[in-house]
Image (tube, grey):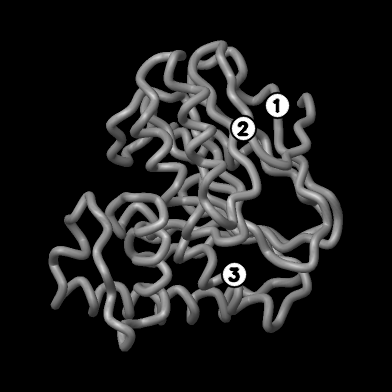
Amino acid sequence: MSSRRIYRQTIDSRDLVTFTVVSGQTDLLIQATHDVRRQALDSVARHRTDIESYLHTHARFATSLQPVVAPDDAPAIICAMAAAACAAGTGPMSAVAGAVAEAVGFDLLEVCDEVIIENGGDLFIHTLVPRTVALYAGQSPLSGRIGIVIDTIDHPIGVCTSTGTFGHSLSLGRADACTVVARSTALADAVATSLCNRVRTENDLAATVDMAATIDAITGVVVILGHHIAIRGQLRLASI
């Protein structure tokens, strides 16, 4: 069973309707105040079309491991990915999962009061009640034992995790989990990738979280490597 399926089994928001939306490589777990499956499918299709059409004529955007500038007339989701990658110092595709979750999330907020979207471990959250996001960190003894408390706020946030020890995403580091909380889910996704690339030993933890603190719109960051953990920002953690 994939790590994605493992942590999906731990989700427990019984006050919301839960369903999945799958289109191509996009596999979203969505929780909302009511069943908006049709609207979600339409949203995913629209944003995937924008991404795929752009990549067809801008191959470097899909392959670069460095920031790539998008023109002003590019689709909104492409501009969001480019801006996030520029802030993080990564390639634009480092932000794609977060950007898709965010774009679909904002679309669904037009018809729902609460929306939580998980896309490959990256979360777009707009909640009216406090919720706790568990931190899954592979084989670390801290995995699944702590979580980030998400309080009710008047705007959505992103909670995104990158790892160097499990999963299919490219990572140059060895962190069990780098989790970033930010106002932008695309930004949180790209920064999580950037942080994970920097962590190879426990000696890298302090400098890594300090770097994250210099990026605007980042609320907080948690980095886990084995039994070591580093935390920065305005986060409230809870035992699980």
Dot 2: within a 10 Å radius of its alpha carbon, few (fewer than 14), some, or many (20 or more) residues? many
Q: Nearer the viewer, residue 21 or 124?
A: 124
* x, y percent for residue 17: 73, 62
Q: Which residue is mark 2?
A: 135
Describe the element under mark 2 as helix, strand or loop: loop
Q: Which quarter shows the N terminus?
A: top left
Residue 222: quadrant of the picture? top right
Residue 34: quadrant of the picture? bottom right
Task: Give me the C-alpha separation between circle 3 and circle 2.
Answer: 21 Å
Q: Which residue is mark 3?
A: 105
2 and 1 marks in contact (CB < 8 Å): yes
Mark carried by residue 146: 1
In the rendered image of this protein, does residue 210 appear above or below residue 229?
below
Please state which amino acid type lies under the numbered disc 1. Answer: Ile
Instruction: Compare marks 2 and 1 and give the one earlier in the sequence.
Output: 2
* x, y percent for residue 76: 41, 80
Residue at (42% x, 57% y) in the render: 97
Q: Residue most toward the right?
A: 129
Please state which amino acid type lies under the numbered disc 2. Answer: Leu
Describe the element under mark 3 as helix, strand or loop: helix
Please state which amino acid type lies under the numbered disc 3. Answer: Gly
In the rendered image of this protein, does residue 132 appear above or below residue 204?
below
Task: Give me the C-alpha separation between circle 2 and circle 1.
Answer: 6 Å
Instruction: Compare marks 3 and 1 and give the one earlier in the sequence.
Output: 3
In the picture, measured across the screen, residue 184 lies left or right of residue 166, that is: right
In the rendered image of this protein, does residue 83 appear above or below residue 167?
below
